[in-house]
Image: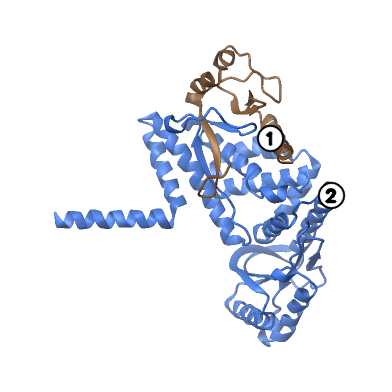
Chain colours: A brown, B blue
Amino acid sequence: MKNKEDKKTLNAIHERDIEDFLEKLGIKEDFNNNKIKCKFCDAIVNKENIYSLFRESGAIKLVCDNPKCINKMMIYIEEKKKKNND
Amino acid sequence: MLNFLLGSGATALVILYLLLKYPDSVEKYVSNIAWFVSFICNRADYIAIKKEVQGKINSFVNNLHIETTATNFTKVKIEWANKNEKERVDFEDYETIIVMRDRKSRNKNFTHAAYFYTSEVLLSRSKKYLSPNQKKSLDLFTTKKILDTQNKASIEEFMNNYFIPSIENQGVKDYIIQYKNIEEVGLFFPVLIQELTYLGNKAILSNKNRKEEIIKEVKNLISFLKKFAEREVGDYNIQDTFSGTLTRCSIKIVASRQSREQNNIIPQKERICRAVNSGCENIYVIGSAQKENRKFVDSVVRRILEEKGNLKKEKELKFEGQVTIKGEKITTETYFIHLHNPENVKHLI
């Protein structure tokens, strides 16, 4: 999404706001109980290793900070966006 | 009282001037102050992170605008997803939110943001047509450049976690080696990134069959630039023109010492005009940045522009690059002029 100054907006969340944010998204309890796995590997995502989050068909997906998963996420998101644009 | 008002007015004017003239540098200074304040009030790190990422990435983008033409590279703006006034939980599918951490992870924050920026934003139009290895290698090489120039402290984190694991892929590694050679002579951003930007603007509505063709063309362009970068000074047999379906460019060296001393403008001018006549869209004129040579290059270019009214002088710059003399690499200042012929632009529709 580009804003009016023609800048790309990079959405960010501070680690100290994660719990509040996940509560609003309805997944705080699962997150705190270590029930959410990384979208791209089987690692449990917690406050220490969370890298990013995105929606997929409405559901919230979390990604851990393993560089392999970050790379996979970049490719995955790009392909999905491309498909949606097609 | 009057003195005080005049003083504060002047200060305000200076601050306003700096804000308008160098907004990205000002952001970097603000981030340093905010990081310092965050020792006392940890919530200052919201400002520190935001200003640091914006200031440094956007300074890099400003440098891209100095080194290239053709396109406005998009700048970046950080938006906190959970800040009271702009709270957003309704983000769209595949709209990504990245997690930033406190000052202990300052380098990690910047690495994540820079890599995210190059992957998502830089050359986004061109990358649609590139192979995964071409994309990946460009992202890695460009992110390294951002960190090298803006945040050296992040390099180790980036190299260990992203760069080194990624070059285990031989295809990515091969491209990176070629970029390194091209960068050493100073042509990575002014020519390669420039040409890829043009290519992204030209490859409109290309179907999948054409994608393969574009991937091959980019591979050949990179190989052409790499070979050119490795040329020995005085070797005029090396290919200096690249003719693809979408990319047609030529790099012309002006001039030999003999030509310059004899003020032999005509042969140099004709050599470049032949490249224009053969359909080249971009001509990159390069030579030594020594005063005498610069004057000579300017005279040649002036004569070309007089003769070819459709040709535009897009950019003129000086940069440090390496030249090879008898196998030895020597750092020298290069003078560079980019000439563009809009009449030779072909779109792929």
Give the labeled residue for mark 2: B212
Of B20 and B230, nearer the camera is B20
Of B178 and B92, nearer the camera is B92
Would you identify the image quadrant in which residue B236 lies? bottom right
Q: Residue at x 71, y 26 (%)?
A: A40
Residue B280, image x and y in percent? 76, 69
Would you identify the image quadrant in which residue B345 lies? bottom right
Amino acid type assigned to the residue bearing label 2 in the image? Glu
Q: Is residue B184 left or right of residue B33?
A: right
**In the rendered image, the vertical position of residue A29 relative to residue B203, given as above or below:** above
Q: Residue at x 62, y 58 (%)?
A: B71
Callout 1: few (<14), some (14-19), or many (20+) C-alpha neighbours within 10 Å?
some
Give the labeled residue for mark 1: A77
Q: What's the CA distance linking mark 1 and mark 2?
A: 22 Å
**In the rendered image, the vertical position of residue B65 relative to residue B87, given as above or below:** below
Q: Which mark is residue B15?
A: none
> What is the chain identity of the residue bearing mark 2?
B
Of B175 and B249, nearer the camera is B249
Residue B177, image x and y in percent? 75, 50
Amino acid type assigned to the residue bearing label 1 in the image? Ile
Which element carries disc 2, helix, strand or loop? helix
**In the rendered image, the vertical position of residue B91 relative to residue B224, given as above or below:** above
Of B282 and B256, nearer the camera is B282
Would you identify the image quadrant in which residue B69 lies? bottom right
Which element carries disc 1, helix, strand or loop? helix
